[in-house]
Amino acid sequence: MKTRVTILFLALTALFTFPVFAQDTSGSLATVSYNGITFSYDPALGAVLPQTFAEVPASPDEMVDTYWPAHTSFTFIPATEGETLMNPGLYPTLTIYKTDDITAYNDEHYTYQLQLLSGLLEGGGAGDFSSYELVPSDDSVVNLPHLPVIPAGQVIRAQAEYLPITDGNGIRYLTSYAFDVSPLTDDGIIYTYQGATHLFSGNGTSYYVAFTYPIKTGVLPAEISSDFDYNAFSENYIAEMNAAIQTINNADPNTFSPSIATLDALVQSISIAV
């Protein structure tokens, strides 16, 4: 963890010493342009650190989140302390991959996520995600696509919708990841968008667009209470999780923090000209 924080500090220091991108905050929205990628966002989401990452070869002896295909990443340093993903050293990010790079990378984890997204988008972005927003009562696995790969189980999917972007389409949803059977708390919910440009048209270079940001719903407990009955919860796990998903889906997304509309607007402002 200390290494990650040190690297981030050095990167931020370099950013402010040697500007490598344009960031306009003169209006109500901030606009970032780097490496041919431009987007606008609410400055309350934090400062943005853009970086270009070379490919790190896949290794069966390493955790899947320690290697990756080449990509461009925009790391958000939230204005609110503690607004990170899953652990204090993991910041929300917008990540852009060339789909050809994912294919050529030939790693089963990345290939699976691209195939999963392709299958959902091939029909043109029609239909709903009700079958994905249920925790199955058997041992079957239900997932929506997510890059970067997270080495944990995707335990819920809620507020899922198709969301078109410039020259493409994708899926926006709320999710949570876990290593065990655990109740949902509001600090474990993340917004994610997984989409692609020019995936089937052949009219230009195809890019995989992945954006992940922590979100507070306000309808889940902030923490596990001291008198929580874990045995009762685990025995009724599927019903408990499906009830939590229904609660999130029935809530007004405009009351979430940040609102889903704020995060959707960022995604739909993305343009790629490289």
Image (cartoon, rainbow, N blue to C red):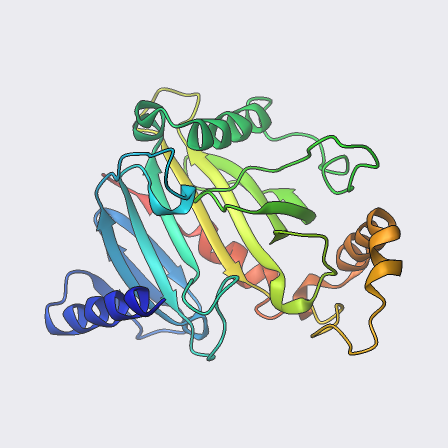
Q: Dividing the image into 4 quarters, which one contains the C terminus?
A: top left
Which image quadrant is residue 190 in?
bottom right
Task: Choose between 130 and 25: the one closer to the eye.
Answer: 130
Residue 89 drawn above or below residue 127 = below
Residue 87: x %, y % from top left: 49, 65
Residue 155 place in picture, x, y as percent: 68, 47
Vertical arrangement, residue 185 with respect to residue 168, above or below = below
Rendered residue at 50%/62% (across/down): 85
Does residue 216 show up? no
Left or right: residue 233 versus residue 48 is right
Where is residue 256? Give x, y as percent. 65, 68
Res. 230 image quadrant: bottom right
In-image side of 100 versus 219 (left or right): left
Quadrant in which the N terminus appears: bottom left
x 25%, y 66%: residue: 23
- Nearest the eye: 14 or 126: 14
Using the image as rendered, state which of residue 163 and residue 195 is in the foreground: 195
Work out whether 9 lies above or below 100. below
Q: Residue furthest left?
A: 18
Q: Residue at position x 74%, y 64% from top?
A: 252
Check the image and report above or below for 34 versus 81. Answer: above
Direction from residue 123 to residue 228 in the image, left or right: right
